[in-house]
Structures are given as structure tokens and as C-alpha cells.
Amino acid sequence: MGAMLGNRATTVFEGGLQMRSPRLVLPFSFFLICGALPSTTAQDARAQETATAQEPTAGPAEIGDPPRGPTDPAEFEAFVDGVMDVLLVEFRTAGAVVSAVSGGEVFFAKGYGYSDWEGRVPVDPETTLFRIGSVSKLFVWTSVMQLVEQGLLDLDTDINEYLDFEIPATYDEPITLSNIMAHAAGFEDYVVELFGDEREDVRPLGDLLKDQIPQRVRPNGDISSYSNHATGMAAYIVERVSGTEWKDYVDENIIEPLGMQYTSFRQPLHEPLEPHMSKGYSYGGGQFREADFEYVPLAPVGAATASAGDMSRFMMAHLQLGELDGQRVLSEETARLMQSDHHRMAPEVNAMAHGFMVYDGHGERIIGHGGDTRIFHTGLWMFPEHDFGLFVSFNSQQSGGARGRLFSAIMDRYFPVEEEIPPADSSFVDRAARFTGEYRANRFSHSTVAKLAALQTSSVSATSRGTLRAVGTYWVEESPLVFREEYGTRKLIFREDESGNITHFFLSTTPIAAFERVPVTEHPAPHLVIFILAIATTLLALLSPILGWIIRKWHKVPSHELVRIPGGARATLWFTALLFVVAAFLIGPNLTPSKLSVEVPGLLGMGFLFPILAGLMTLGAAVYAGRIWAKRQGRFTVRVFYSVAVLAYILFLWQLYVWNFLGWNY
């Protein structure tokens, strides 16, 4: 979910992106001096999200090869035990669970570490509950497909026909459930108050969505960008059309029919399940620290709590095309439709199914989803052609990367492939310039102060060998606009506009986000220069009375010989600098991702008043600058300094406007 119920690696696992070795540009805003928001994603989130699906490295197995996939539960257990022993230590994890299903049965299930570190309570795969984050969305998509099957929903109908609030017609084409299930509705990301810290934060779904309608920032149906709120709208549509509150609907139509006794969307958990909840942990100072229960106000998209045993039942139902133990939650036809390829941003990019993400890799077709809260990290993958499913979850904040590492190890052992290294074409050096530059993941907030996360960019550069370097690895040209990973078979696909200018690149393993070329007005480099200039101006303006006094004393300049600019001009510039400093100390500490994702601190409202007051003072300083030049007041060097300072603040105010820091944008 979100930057935090999701996160950032070269491939998108679910909610957000996390680059394997991003070029993180120094955040420019003076608010960051006091610890302001560096990224969302992620983000996270940001990033934040470190789980990735295994990236493909070769084609499918040939006829006559040994069976692919695990076949011996004892051997599989021994292998997973070895991997998990390493991961729990490396990723500072208190406890985890792994389960696998095959042939309509539980193939393997085991807990690792502890659900209660201090009490030394071991993880039980059947009864210990983990928060599964955005894996919860699979329940939303299943419920949508149930109502499609019943003829109560149409995937291609304008969602405004189902909602009791209006999605603005920013673009001509109406948003449909098909768009939402592909994360191609065109919404910005919305991360403010994505989490809660008390039960009162969990409000009725409709009330929450009406208060948090994200802006439409791109045409729907084309480029994907992961959206928690769009998924929430889908759940609300289920609620309205069925006439049943969504958490009751999912209990009655999915959880109970599948016999999932240890699964719930209730927050907090109802009493029978509460004793089975794994505690969540962060690690620091050489010890595990227990975290509070995490509330997810937008409950359907990330609030589910489940045991590995129950998620095994959920996987078996989908692998068996909607049926488990004589109970059917989807018809076979609907289940096949739900798992079928639905939307691609480019022919070489993995598809989105109807809610499932497609992780084509190692020559296998894999569907699934990942999920992250701030503490728990979860992954679910299914191999329909092998009737095999895998579920993993970790209960500690630092363990986001462990999920992808476990999956990669399993893929390498049970679905092995041989890497092919394509040759580089040295003549590409002459064609490389059109691809190089700064790009950014398109999942970020456009309308709130969380837009600052868009400062995290990814560089594409050319090498002298005729390759591109991007997202931490090297790429060889395969065909116009398509590049193949030098050590692997992922692909990097560029998109050009009608004039032949490169506008985006896609990763073949990332079906839910694109990388867009950073516009000139939001490029980190000029903004960093403006930031440094504003900092220098502020320091000099605040210290100028003292510095001037020291200089006059040093040179023994009598007061009657001073040639000064008017006192009002000096005071205006000094108070402008002071207002910016006050804003920094009020806003900065209250704009961290951990705070903004839970609540809007009260001091933020007061803090954002000061940049506006500073803007008015800057306007006054600009008037003074014109007057002192017209009347030749003060020494020439002082007039120049004053004018440069005013210009620096004008640029800084423009910068704050670009990143939504002028006004109350949260």
C-alpha cells in the first residue's frame, strides 16, 4: 500500500518503486534542514518498499527438462531453512512465516523466529497473524469480479455511475474499473494520513474517499501508476452495489466460504483473534523495539490481518479457479478472466491482470501481489501452470528486502535458467544522447507537500562501450527504443512523442509504474542552486547588522560618513530572512514521512503561514530595491547585494510554489 504499504527497487513489487541504486538528489528545500520529508515512496516507501519480484533471466525450459518447481517437501524445507537463517539475521527480523501450496494441498508451512520477541513465543504458520499490507487488495479484486460475474458491475462503465461523489472530468475518457484494476486510472499518489495511530482514524470508507479525492494527472487507460485510493474506490463500489459494508461483504463472500478462520479486516482485531496477532518490531541500538498496532484508514487496500495457513487457502482457491473444498467464490470462467493479461504499457512490459500483478520471470508466468505496512512486509506469488503458490511475511521494519531475496533464491534453485549476455554495439555511442538524462518514477503526489518525493530521480547515462547505465545496471540496445539487461533478460523500453523526443522509460518487470523524464522546471540541479543561494542569502541577511558593525569598527568609519540604504529596506530584508527561518523550524520537524503519513501535525498550519508572510515581505523588498536604484541610495555594492538578495528570495518563493510549500497543501 502506498509508499509505505508498498515501496522502491528496480522492479515494482507492489505499492511503490524502490531503485536498486538510485541517484538520490539532495533535497533542496530549507525545510529539510530540520528533517522534512525526503521522499514518500515511497514510497518508502517509501521506501521504503524493497521487495521485488524475481526478475527474468532466460527463456522457458525445453521439452524433456526435469520438472520445474519444488517436488520434495523435506528438501524444500531444508533449503528454505538455510535461506531464512541468513535473512533473519541480515535484515534484523524478529519473526517470519513461509507457506507453499501445490496440487491443491499445503506443500510446506513453517514459522521462523518469534511473534513475541520478549516472551519468546514462536511463529505458528497456522494461527499467528501478520499484517499483509497491499496483498489485501486481492480481496478487493476478488469481490469486484464476484459482482461482475453476477452482472451487478461492468468493468467498462464510468465509475461515477456507481459512486455517490463525482470524479472530475479532467480528461475526456471516463475512468472505469478496468482502468483501476490496471492502476491506470491516471490519479496522483496520495500519502497524507495513509496510516493511523488510533481506532478513531478508521472512518467509513465513503467519508474518507470523499475527503481524499486524488487529482487526475494523466489520461487514464495508458500509463500505470499505483494507486491506493483508486483501489479504495473499487471497494466502495462493491459496498454500494452490494448494499453491504465492505468488511462484512468480504467476510460473508470470501473469508467464511474459504474457511479462513484467522483472517480479518477489522481494526482493531476482534477479541478471538487478538491473542494470535504477531507483534511488530523495529530494530535499533542492538535490540528489537515493539511497535504499536498499525491502523489503515483506507482499510480494504491494506488492513487485512491473516495467518499463512489462511493465505494458503486463498492461494489454493485461486489456483483451482475459484473453488476450494466444494466452496466456490468465483466461477471458473471468471477466475480465468481475473488471471488473464489485461493491460500493458508497452509490448515488452509485463502485463497487469485484473488486479493481479504479472511477474513473468525465469520463463514462468507468475501472478501475485506484495504488501507493506510500515512494519510488516509480505509477498504472495502463484504459478498457475505449475499449480504452485508461495506466501511469505516478515514482522520487522527492516525486513522489506528479505522478501525479494527469499523469492529470488527459490526461483534460482527451482526454476533455474542460463543467463545470456548480449553483445554491446559500440556505434550506439552516437545515438545515446537522446536517451540520457534524469527520470523519475511517476508515482508521487502532485498536489500536496509530499510532492517533494519527486526529487528522487534516476539517471540514464551512456558508456564508452556502447551501453546505457540505468537503475543500477547496464543495458544493451536490442532494437530501436528497446534495451536488454547486459547480465539478465529484463528490458528497458523507452517511449517517444510525435516529435521523436523521449518522454518515458519502462522496466519490463514493472507493470504498475513508469519513469517520466523530469521537466526542466522540476529538475533537481537548478533547484539545488536556488536552495543554496537562498540559504546563503538568509545567513547574510540575518548577520548583516553584526557584520556591518564589525566592518565599520574595523575601518573606523564615523557614523556621519556612512552611506546607507533606507532603514526600512534593511529591516524588510532582515525580517524576510527571519520569517523563512521560523518557517523552517516549525515545518521541518513536522513534515517527516512518519508523521505526515499518520496525521497532519497542528504546527504545520501555523508553519505554512510564515512562507506567505515572507512572500509579502519579499514584495516589499522588491519595491525598496527599485527605489534605492532610482534614487541611488546607499553604496553601489550594497545596492547590488540587496537586489541579488531580493532576486534570490523571488526564486526561492517560486521554488516553494513548485513543490507546494506556498499555502496549506496537505
Image (cartoon, helix red, strand yellow):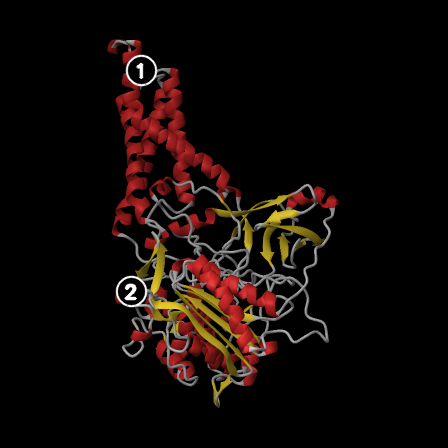
Residue 654's image quarter? top left
**Residue 204 shown left or right of residue 447 in the figure:** left
Judged from the image, the secondary structure of the residue bearing numbered disc 2 is: helix
Q: Earlier in the sequence, mark 1 or mark 2?
A: 2
Label at residue 201: 2
Q: Quadrant of the N terminus?
A: bottom left
- Residue type highlighted by circle 1: Ile
Q: Is residue 607 above or below residue 50?
A: above
**Residue 18 visible somewhere in the drawing:** yes
Q: Nearer the viewer, residue 256 or 330?
A: 256
- Residue type highlighted by circle 2: Asp
Residue 112's image quarter? bottom left
Residue shown at the point (34%, 23%) measured from the top left: 627
Q: Position of residue 167 (x, y in %)?
A: 43, 64
Q: Position of residue 604 (x, y in %)?
A: 29, 48
Q: Identify the residue under disc 1.
A: 551
Residue shown at the point (52%, 71%) measured from the top left: 78
Residue 259's image quarter? bottom left
Q: Position of residue 115 (x, y in %)?
A: 35, 69
Judged from the image, the secondary structure of the residue bearing numbered disc 1 is: helix
Q: Is residue 554 above or below residue 77?
A: above
Q: Position of residue 303 (x, y in %)?
A: 37, 69
